[in-house]
Image: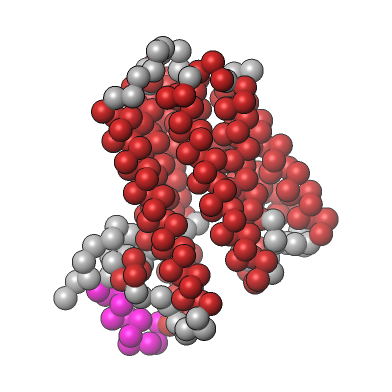
Amino acid sequence: MNPFILASLTAVVVNALFFAYASIKRTDVVTDLSYSLSFGLVSLALILLNTEAGLVALIPAWLTVLWALRLGAYLFTRIIKTKVDHRFDSMRDEPLKFARFWILQAMAVAIIVLPVVASVASDIRPRGFGVLEGLGLVMWLIGFAVEAVSDAQKSAFKKGGAKGLITRGLWRYSRHPNYFGETLLWWGIFVYSLPALYGLFYLSILGPVFITLLLLFVSGIPLLEKSAEAKYGEDPAYQDYKRKTSIFIPLPPRR
């Protein structure tokens, strides 16, 4: 099967199954898990059905499996404690409205994973490990580390019973370091796949562009910034943190 068709079908099937379970049970517990698991299963399918592509071509898929396992474990542990994701309060009991979320998530997965699929699907052989592969791998490792560390710091902050927003660790340099890390690792995968791209395969840049725009302007940072403003907008300490701290790229705090 064509790897692009395989990836899209896998994303659709995984999200359809999770939608059915979530809709019947009226639960939010599997929502975030389905996101990371979609990437993991798409990548695993690519690996198992394209072994002839070679190790260098399959490394992005293996990296995506690793990322999905880490993120999935973190998000699932978090939702098990909270039980409810308030993003779905207005749609949980309306199947058609709820289904729209899962359809959009399946589409997002299929788009974001494009550089992974392109690396596997390319017929440029043999694939060597060159400068761009090395640069892309370094970008991915840094992004993965930033996302994992910032998630761990936030989790420890909440477990410690602290009130308000976390403003230490990586969160001292960015108000959303986890989103920066996730964006960087997807751009790393695209850079890694560049030597294998030609013609329409260059459209795989839509993957990192899509996740960047999504986190910066749609469902990531805007929602969290709005929530933080509603909770802490009257707090001078929050306003000071907001004024001094970069919203996305980790930078030294402004004076």
* Type of colouring: secondary structure
Magenta: main secondary structure: helix
Residue sitting nearer the eye, 232 or 40: 40
Q: Is residue 39 at least partly visible in the picture?
A: yes
Q: Residue at x 40, y 82 (%)?
A: 233
**Where does residue 78 sit, x and y in percent of width and height?**
60, 66
Q: Residue at x 38, y 87 (%)?
A: 235
When the figure is inspected, residue 66 is found, relative to residue 195, above or below; the finding is below
For residue 240: magenta? Answer: yes
The span picked out in magenta is 233-244
> Looking at the figure, which quarter contains the C terminus?
bottom left
Q: Residue at x 44, y 46 (%)?
A: 211
User: Relative to residue 97, is residue 61 drawn left or right?
Assistant: left
Q: Residue furthest right?
A: 24
Quarter-of-image position of residue 135: top left
When the figure is inspected, residue 23 is found, relative to residue 14, above or below; the finding is below
User: Relative to residue 200, is residue 236 drawn left or right?
Assistant: left
Q: Is residue 213 at least partly visible in the picture?
A: no
Q: Residue at x 57, y 20 (%)?
A: 50
**Where does residue 68 sit, x and y in percent of width and height?**
55, 46
When the figure is inspected, residue 189 is found, relative to residue 231, above or below; the finding is above
Residue sitting nearer the eye, 56 or 2: 56
User: Relative to residue 12, is residue 218 drawn left or right?
Assistant: left
